[in-house]
């Protein structure tokens, strides 16, 4: 599975969009980009995933560059409850459940 | 709330002891995975169970073992506990080969003294 690089931490003002970058320059053609987040004292929570097209759901949008070497998770209107560690994971889908969580990005949403 | 429940929430053991952690998967999910999360790190995959058999394993020694029951619930057993086994142990459930979405419980915090 491809390695990912994320900033250690980011801040965002409440109500503004939070844009979390992820670099995955060695991604293979059959590898998907997944995003999970982990709020303090809870288990990770699935957010979104995609292969090459941009994706949107009720939680977030995922923008993947055309060369697929990087992506951005967008939380359109961040709230205080979005404060969490966000993990970007690249892997082949339908593998076993071996999600390779790195250190992630600690997002702090400030009032 | 994911529907995945783990017990106990906290546990204290001493080095050399054995421990059993339990997980009830979300209704309808047939695959259970276990993760270990050390303080300040991301979760690390221990193993996965499907149809009551181990179906994938991470880089963990054999003293980490598991069971899955016919109702898809699961246990994680750790023998000969070491201090470095102190961590948050997370259980995740999913549908087999529909594992883009893992549903995690809140974990069991294990402290080994």
Image: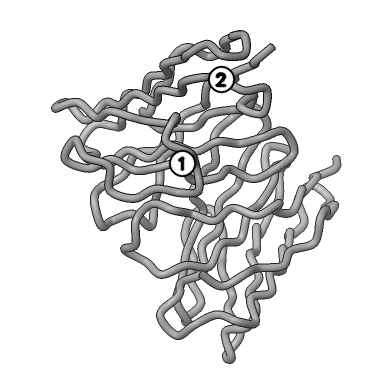
Say which residue label 1 marks: B46
At 77% from the left edge and 49% from the top edge, which residue is drawn? A107
Q: Compare marks 2 and 1 and give the one earlier in the sequence.
A: 1
Mark 2 surroundings within 10 Å by alpha-carbon count, few (fewer than 14), some (14 through 19), many (20 or more):
many
Q: From what the image shows, is residue B85 above or below residue A18?
A: above
| Left or right of residue B25: residue B112 | right
Chain of the residue displaying label 2 = B
Residue A47 horizontal side relative to residue B48, left or right? right
Colour logic: one colour
* Residue A37 % position (x, y): 60, 47
Secondary structure category for the residue under label 2: loop
Chain letter of the residue carrying label 1: B
Q: Which is nearer the eye, B95 or B108?
A: B108
Q: Quadrant of the C terminus of chain A?
A: top right
Q: Is residue B85 above or below residue A38?
A: above
Q: Which numbered tag is attached to residue B54?
A: none
Where's residue B69, x and y in %?
A: 19, 26
Q: In the depicted view, which residue is nearer to us: B39 or B13?
A: B13
Asked if residue A71 lies left or right of residue B68, the reply is right
Which residue is farthest bottom?
A: A67
In this rendering, the answer to whether A77 lies above or below A109 is below
Looking at the rendering, which quadrant does residue B34 occupy?
top left
Frontmost of labels 2 and 1 is 2
Which residue position is annotated with label 2?
A: B81
């Amino acid at each position: 599975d491809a390695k990912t690089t994320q900033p250690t931490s980011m801040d965002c003002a409440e109500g503004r969009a939070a844009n979390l970058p992820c670099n995955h320059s060695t991604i293979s053609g059959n590898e998907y980009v997944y995003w999970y987040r982990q709020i303090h004292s809870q288990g990770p929570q699935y957010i979104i995933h995609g292969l090459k097209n941009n994706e949107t759901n009720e939680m977030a949008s995922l923008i993947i560059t055309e060369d697929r070497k990087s992506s951005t998770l967008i939380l359109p209107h961040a709230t205080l409850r979005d404060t969490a560690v966000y993990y970007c994971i690249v892997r082949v889908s339908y593998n076993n459940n071996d999600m390779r969580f790195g250190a992630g990005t600690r997002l702090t949403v400030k009032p | 709330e994911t529907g995945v429940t783990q017990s106990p929430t906290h546990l204290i053991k001493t080095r050399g002891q054995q421990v059993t952690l339990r997980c009830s998967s979300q209704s309808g999910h047939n695959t259970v995975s276990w993760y270990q999360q050390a303080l300040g790190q991301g979760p690390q995959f221990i193993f996965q169970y499907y149809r009551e058999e181990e179906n994938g394993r991470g880089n963990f020694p054999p003293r980490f073992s598991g069971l899955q029951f016919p109702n898809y619930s699961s246990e994680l057993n750790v023998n000969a506990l070491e201090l470095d086994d102190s961590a948050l142990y997370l259980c995740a459930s999913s549908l087999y080969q529909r594992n883009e979405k893992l549903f995690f419980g809140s974990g069991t915090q294990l402290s080994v003294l």
